[in-house]
Amino acid sequence: MPRILVVDDEPTLVETIRYNLKREGYEVVTAVDGEQAVQVARRDHPDLIVLDLMLPKLDGFEVCRILRRESTIPVIMLTAKDEEVDKIVGLEIGADEYVTKPFSMRELLARVRALLRRVQMIRDEAAERHVEEPAILRAGDLELDPGQHRVFRAGVELSLKPKEFDLLGFLLRNRGQVFTREILLQRVWGYDYFGDTRTVDVHVRGLREKVEIDPSEPTRIETVRGVGYRFAG
């Protein structure tokens, strides 16, 4: 039974989400502010977090930053705002999905199911690759260790967000092939991902900052104009 942490300072909304998640068969724990959210996440190790952006003590962005340094727990971020800049910031700090209030409970439940399926699919594929792929994926001075979930450039370990790691691993395994943004969303984020293609651009930009000598003139993760991206070398 997956355990879900719901974080919001609106008691009525928390209870509504909790009720509907429990009806779907999930175990639910809750928190009403950012500090409590971090404490509960560390204590109860949830499989997914539904996280409000506007919280007392620590806002959702800061909670997400803290947890991303410690784990790869998938996060659905809730917000009353509908500004693109907030969505981009949320994606850059590690949120997996973004839902704008007001939202239908059916939509939220669908996103929860889809995200949990996507996480399980990634785990299953990783287990299959554990036998089939080399222990270390290499490209020049870049090394990716799938087993230990670590990446090194010229011997220095890089700090990658979970989806940056997944995206880099996918591109390395398929070096030279060009993928559209839609295909990358399907293969890296999952076949039932609800997000838009800007998600891919955000993560490619973040990766280039870490793996390219000159991110403004990338030689590894190349843009193929009118098509998408490929890992060239």
Image: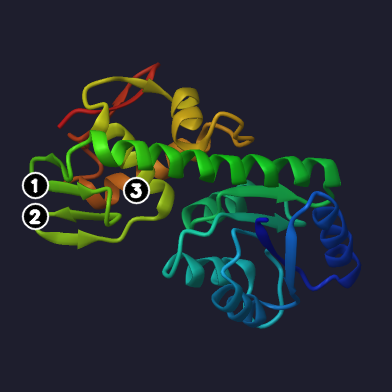
Whole-number angstrom distance, CA of label 2 to CA of label 3: 17 Å
Q: Does 108 sit left or right of 129 as displayed?
A: right
* Earlier sequence position, callout 3 versus callout 1: 1
Helix, strand or loop under label 2:
loop
Vertical placement of residue 2 versus 109, above or below: below
Asked if the residue under mark 1 is in contact with the one under mark 3, i.e. CB atoms within 8 Å, the reply is no
- Answer whether residue 50 is visible to the viewer in this image: no
Asked if the residue under mark 1 is in contact with the one under mark 2, i.e. CB atoms within 8 Å, the reply is yes
Residue 47 image offset from top left, x and y in percent: 59, 59
Identity, as a three-letter code, of the amino acid under mark 1: Asp
Q: Nearer the viewer, residue 185 or 215?
A: 185
Q: Does 197 sit left or right of 123 as displayed?
A: right
Q: Which residue is mark 3?
A: 165
- Report the quarter where the N terminus lies: bottom right
Q: Which residue is mark 1?
A: 141
Identity, as a three-letter code, of the amino acid under mark 2: Ala
Q: Which residue is mark 2?
A: 154
Whole-number angstrom distance, CA of label 2 to CA of label 1: 5 Å
Outermost residue toward the top in this view: 226
Q: Residue at x 58, y 78 (%)?
A: 43
Vertical placement of residue 209 versus 93, above or below: above
* Earlier sequence position, callout 2 versus callout 3: 2
